[in-house]
Amino acid sequence: MKRLGMLCIVMFIFLSATTVLAGGRLVVYCSNEPFACQAVADAFAEKYDVKVQMTRSGSGSTYAKILAEKDNPKGDVWYAGTLDPHSQAGVNGLLEPYESPMLEEIGAEFRNPATSKQHHSAGVYAGVLGYSVNTDVLKEKNLPMPRSWEDLTKPAYKGLVQVASPQSSGTAYTVLATMVQLKGEEEAFEYLAKLHQNVNQYTKSGSAPGKAAARGETMIGIGFLHDHALQKANGFPLELVVPSEGTGYEIGGLSIIKGARNMENAKKFVDFMLSAEGQEVPQRVKMFQVPTNINANVPKEAIRLDQVKLIDYDFVTYGSEKMRSHLIDRWAKEIKPIER
Amino acid sequence: MSDSSIRIILKNVSKHFGKVRALDAVEIEFAPGSLTTLLGPSGCGKTTLLRLVSGLEEVSSGEIWFGDENVTHLSATRRDIGMVFQSYALFPHMTVEQNVGYGLGVLKTAPGEIRDRVREVLDMVAMDGYQQRYPNELSGGQQQRVAVARAMVLRPKVLLFDEPLSNIDSKLRRSMRDDIRRLQQASGITAIYVTHDQAEALAVSDEIIIMRNGMIEQKGPPQDLYHRPETSFVANFIGESNVVSGELKGTGENRKIIFGDAAIAVNDSMPVRDENGPIKLSLRPEVLEITQREETSPPNGLSGIIVQSAYMGPVIEYSIETQAGVLFTRAPVYAGQFKANDEVCVRIRPEEIILIPENGQDI
Amino acid sequence: MIRTKTDRAPGEIGPWALLSWLLIALAAYALLPWTALEYGLGDFTPDEWMDALGWRHNLTTLVFPGLLVMLVPFVWIRFPARGYAWCFTVVTGLAIGILLAGFITTRTSMGLGAGVVVMCLAALFAIGIAELGFQRGDTFIAGAVIFVVFMVCLFIFFPVWEIFRNVLFDKAQTFVPLQFFDIVTSFGVGRVIGNTLLLAFSVGIATTVFGLIFALYAVRATTRLRYLIRVFYILPIITPPFVVGMSLILIFGRAGMINDGLMFLIGPNGLLTPEGSPGLFERSGYIYGFTGIFLAQTLSLTPISYMVISGMLASINPAMEEASLTMRAGRWETLWKVTFPLIRPGIANAFLLGMISSAADFGNPLVLGGEYDVLSTEIYFSIAGAQLDFARAAALGLILLFLSLTIYFIQNKWIGKKSYVTVTGIETSGNVTPLPAGLQRAMTIFITFWFLLIGAVYLSIFLGGFVKQWGADYTLTLSHHLELWSKGFDSGAWPSFKHSLLFALIAAPLTTLAGVLIAYILTRKQFWGRGIIDFGTVLIFAIPGTVIGVAYILAFNTAPIELTGTAIILIITMAIRAMPVGIRGGMSALGQISTSLEEASLLQRAGSLKTIRAVLLPLLKSTIVSSMAYSFIRAMTTVSAVIFLATAGTDVATTYILSRVESGDTGVAVAYGSVLIFTMLVFTLLVQFATGRSRTEKQVNL
C-alpha cells in the first residue's frame, strides 16, 4: 500500500515535469513583494525563454541563505530588497562584480552604490521614507495634517502613530538611521523617545503600518511611501507625506551571486532589470517604487525624487553591520521599554 | 490413535515474563493421540504452557519437540496446530463458512474443496446449515462448536483447548465436553486441554497434569489422581477433600493411624511408610458416614458436633466440628437428617482413607 | 498432513520477494538520479537527469550495485543454520552505513535513486534480521518495525537533534555549550517566555472553567440549549486556528464593529455626544496583544476542554451521586463533595491541555499579537524576519519543546494514574443528578452569551468576505470572492487550494496507515529497541507545530537530505502533524480487538501480513476511515509547521490566507477562510453521513 502511494507521488512528479528549455535556467532570489517577484520572473522568462525558479524571502533572510550556500551556491541572482544586505554580501565576497552595459541609463548615484565600490550591486529602484495619514480618521478627530517628523511627536497624535520595530524590520531601521543622520545620534534618540509616546504599536513587518493606516486601524503609518501609494491606488483615503525636514530613502539592490550556475542568464537578467522595460514591470502590479533608469516611465503615484527633500543617505556607514546592531540594540534597550 | 498422531515432548522448558517465572524447568511428554488436561488454579502456568506449545509464546529456555521435529523456534504459523480459544476468537466480520474455511483459503485450497471440507467438519460438530450466519447471530454453544470445527478443519498435528467451556452455561457444558472428547478420539489428534474445572478435567482426560506455581504437581490418569493424590494440594484440587493431620503409632498388629479421637488399624493394603510419626490423610466428603452419637464411639469413628447443615436437594452437606478439625461431609437425604448442635459420630472405612505421601508440611 | 517440513508458510519471504527487492534497488541505481537534481524533481532536463545518475556521477558508487549483485546468488542458495541470514544482515547493514556516511561526509544531497536503494536495503536488512530470529522470523513485522524506526529517526529524532545542534554549535561548527544561555539571557527572551507562560496559564484556567461549565450543562442541565453544546465541539476542528483571531479584529479591532459603534454613538461628533464636547470615547486597540490572543484562544480551545471534562463527567456512576443524595446531602453539596472530586483528573487534564494548546498556538498570536511576543511567533520571526537567526530560533524552539514535553509527561504519568473513573463494565442505572436550579439559570445566561459571541465570530467571517472594506466601506460586493476564484485555475486562490487538497489527500492515508502501524506495534509487539518508537510517539504527540517547522527547516535545508521547497516536505509535515489522530484511533480500536483473533488467524497458517489484511483491517475499517477524514481536516487547517516550509510554488490555503492577512487584505483573507471552513464543514458532514454516526466526539476526546 505504502509503496504504491510512494510510487504514485513519484509518477505524479515525473508527469508534471517539464523538460524542454531553449534558453536554460535562472534561479532568482527575490526580496520584493511576492506579486512583484512573480511579475518580474514571468516577464524575464517570457522574453528570453528561460526557465525561472524564484524563491522569495526578505533581504535579511536572503543574505543569510546566500551566506549559508557559499560553498555550493544554489541561487544565480538576487533582486530587490534594501541595499544594506547587498552591500554586506559584496564586502564578504559573496557576489560577482558585473558592470552592465545598461548602467549608462542609470542615475549616477545608483550605478555603484554598494560599500565595496566594485560593482557588486546596482540600484534597481529607489523608495522614499515618509508617512501616510488616513484622512477619514483625521477628519473624524478634527486634527491638523502633520507635515514634518517633528509634528509626529505632538501630544495630539498620541496613540495614532504606527511604525515597525527595527528589531524585525529593515524599513524601521532606515527610519532609525535617517533620524540619526538628520539630527545626530543623541538628539535622534531623544526624538524617538518622544515619538514612542505617540506610537500605538510597533509592528513586525515594515509594510504593516501603511496597511493599518489604509484600514483606519491607525491614523498615521510610517514606512516607505511606495507601499502606501499602493494602498492609495487601491482607493483608501490616504495622504502621503514626505516630511519637510528631509527624509531618507532606500535603494533596491540587484546583484549576481558569486559562483552562479547560470552566469550568462544572470547577466541577462541584470541587464533586463536595469533596462527601462524591466523597471516598468513592477508598475504593472502596482509597485510604485521610483525607477533608477532615467528613461523609464515614473508612475504617477510614485514620489518623484527631484521634487522632495532627500538627505544625503550614507549607505556605507549606516549599512555596516556594526552601526546597525549598535543602533538597534540602543533602540531596544532605551526606547522600547519606556512606559507609555 | 491414528498413524499420524504425534508425541509432544517438553524438555526442561522455562518461561519468564520479566522477573516473573511463569514456568520452571518443566519436563512432560504427551502421548500420541491422547487428550491431556492441564489443571490448576489461575496463575499456575497452565495457559502459559499451552501457549508455549502453540508457538504464540516463545520459551525462555528448553526445547519443544513434536515427534522427532524440534519446533522450539518455529512460529505458531508453522507449527501445524489447531486451537480453541476461551473467547472462541471467531472473526466477527466473517460468516461461519468463511471462519471455518479461512485457513483452507490461506493454503490456497480450491473454493469447491473448501466448501466441502467446511460442510464435513461442521457436520461433525452438528453445525451444518449455519454456514451463512455471522458469529453474533449464534449462541455461545454454537459459537464454540464453530470454533472447534475451525480448529480441526486443517487436520492439525496438535489440538489445543484453552478453557473452551468456561463461557458456556453449566447445562450445555456437559454435552459440549462429551462432544469434544468424542471428536478428539475419532480424529486421534494429540490434544492438550486447559481448564480450572476439575470435574471437566476428570470427564474428558486420558491424563491430567496438575500444575502449581509454574511446576508440575502430579501427572496421571484421572483415577490415579483422585484416589492416590501425592500432595494435599492435589487432594484438595481433584474432587473435594478434608485433609487432616494424624500420627502413625505402634508396631506390628497394633500399628494404628491416630487422628482426633479415631484410631484406625493399619492393614496391608494401605501404602504406609515404615517409620512412625505425623502423617496427612485425605477424607472425601462423600465417604464420611454420619450416625447418631452412641455411648461408646467405635474406634474408627470421630465424635463431633454439627456446626452447619445445608440442604442441597439429593444430598445434605454438613460441617462437623471434630477433634481432627472441621470436616465437610456430604450425605444422602435418606441417611437421615441432623440439625445444628446435634452430637454425631463420623465413621470412615479404612479402605476409603487416602494417605498423602508428602511429609505433612503444607496443607 | 497439509504440508511438508520444507514448505514455506504463507506470507513468509520467498525467492521472488528477495529478488524483486534486489532488482528494484539495481533498477533504481541504474535509472534514477543518485544525487539530488539541481533544480528538484519537479523540474529537470534530460541532461541533468543523466548527470545525476550514480554510475555517471561517481564511479565509487558502483560499490552498491556490487554489493547487491553479490547477494543475488543467496536468493537461491540456502546456507545451513544462520549463515544465510547473517549474509543479508551484514551486507545490507554495511551498505546502508556506507551509503549514508558517503552522503554525509561529502555533503552531497541524496537523490531519488539513493533513497529507493536505501529503502530496498532496509527491506533486505529486515529480511535478514527476521531470519536471525527478530520478531520470531516474521518478515513483515520485522520490516514494519524497521520502517517505523527509520521514519521516526528521520523525521522526528534527526530534526530535533538539528535543533540541539544549532544551539550547541555555532556557524563554524565549533562547540559552544553556553550559546543557549547567551540567547536565553539576551535582551527580550525572558519577557517572551514570561508572556508565553502567563498566556498559557490564563488560557488554561479560562478554558477549564468554561469547559467545566459547558460540560456540566451538557450532561446535567434540563434545557434544550444543551443539545446545541453537543454540536459546537466540531467548530474548532474545522476552523483554521487563526481565523478566530481574524474575526476578532473584525469585531473588536480599532476599525471593528464595536469601536465603530461606540464611536458612532459617543465618540467625538457622535450621535449622543453633546455639541462641542470632546466625546466620551476614543478608538482603542485593546484587542491587539494579550486580551485578543487570550480571547481568541479561549474561544477556540474551550470546546476541547469541554470534551475532556464531559467525557469524564459522563462516566461517573450516577449511583454515587444518588448515594450522596440519600445521605441527606443537597445538590450543591453533592456537586462539591462528590462530583468535583471525581472529575478532578479530568479538570487537571483539561487545564494542561489548554495550557499546551495555548503555548503551541501560532496563528492567533501572529494575527493578534501586536507587541505581545510569545515563543511561537518569536521562533517564526527569528527565521522569517530580518535576521534569519537559526540559533535563536532553535533555542526558543527548544524551550517550547521542553515546556510541552513537561506538560505532556505530567498529563500522562501523574494524572493518568490518578483517575477515579468508575468503569466497572456493569451497566449503570439511575438518573443523573440535575444541577441546582440557580446554577443552571446562571449557566444558561452565560452560555447564551457565549453562543452569541461565537455566532458573531462566524458571521463576521462569512460577511467579511462580502463587504468591500470592513470598518470603512460596508458596501456589499463579490469582488473578494471573484478575485480569489474567478481568475482561472492558475491564479488567485486556486493554486494554494489545489495544493492544500492534493497534499492533504496524499498525507491523510499515509499518516493514517503509519499511525495505525505504530499503534499496532505499540499495542502488540515487544522487542528490543521498542523504546525508540515509544519516545518517538511521545514527541509526535507533544511537539508543537512551530518547533516541527523550525526543526524541518534546519534538518532538510541542506545535504544530505534536501527537501525544503518541495511538495514532499509539506506532505510529510502534514502527515506528522496529523499522526496523533491515527495513533490514538488505532490504539483505542486495537485495544478493543482481542489478540486471540490474531492468534486464531496465525494458527490457521496465515502469516502476519495476511492476518492484518484479513482480520485486523476489516475490523479497523471505521477507525481508519474516520482517522483519514480527521487527518485530512488537520492537514488542511494546519498552519504553524507548514508556514516555515511553504514556498511560492507550494503555498497552501492556510499560508496563502496568512500572507493576505499580513499584507492587509482582510476581506480576501476572510473570504477564503469562510470558503475553507465551509468546505471542511461539508466534508465533515459527508463523512459522518457515510460512516453512519458521529465519531468526532471520540476522536477529539481520545
Image: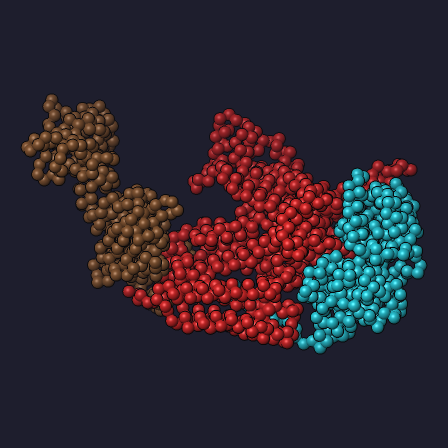
How many numbered circles are shown? 0
Where is residue A70? Give x, y as percent. 70, 63
Q: Is residue C234 left or right of residue C284?
A: left
Quick check: A247 above or below C338? below
Identify the residue at horizontal 76%, vertical 65% (top origin): A95
Q: Is residue A247 left or right of residue C516?
A: right
Q: What color was chain A assigned in the picture?
A: cyan
Q: Nearer the viewer, residue B95 or B167?
A: B167
Identify the residue at horizontal 61%, vertical 53% (top origin): C165
Q: Is residue B71 left or right of residue C85?
A: left
Q: Nearer the viewer, residue A77 or C60?
A: C60
The red one among the chains is C
Q: Nearer the viewer, residue C587 or C440?
A: C587
Identify the residue at horizontal 66%, vertical 39% (top origin): C202
In which quadrant is the N terminus of chain B drawn? bottom left
Where is residue B212? Give x, y as percent. 28, 43
Quick check: B205 above or below A8? above
Quick check: C298 above or below A95? above
Where is residue B330? Give x, y as percent. 20, 34
What is the image's colouring?
by chain
Tell me the quarter of the picture where residue B345 sits: top left
Where is residue C85? Give x, y as percent. 40, 64
Quick check: B306 above or below A104? above
Please say whether residue A20 is visible from this viewpoint. Answer: yes
In which quadrant is the C terminus of chain B drawn? top left
Please say whether residue B329 is visible from this viewpoint. Answer: no
Q: What color was chain B assigned in the picture?
A: brown
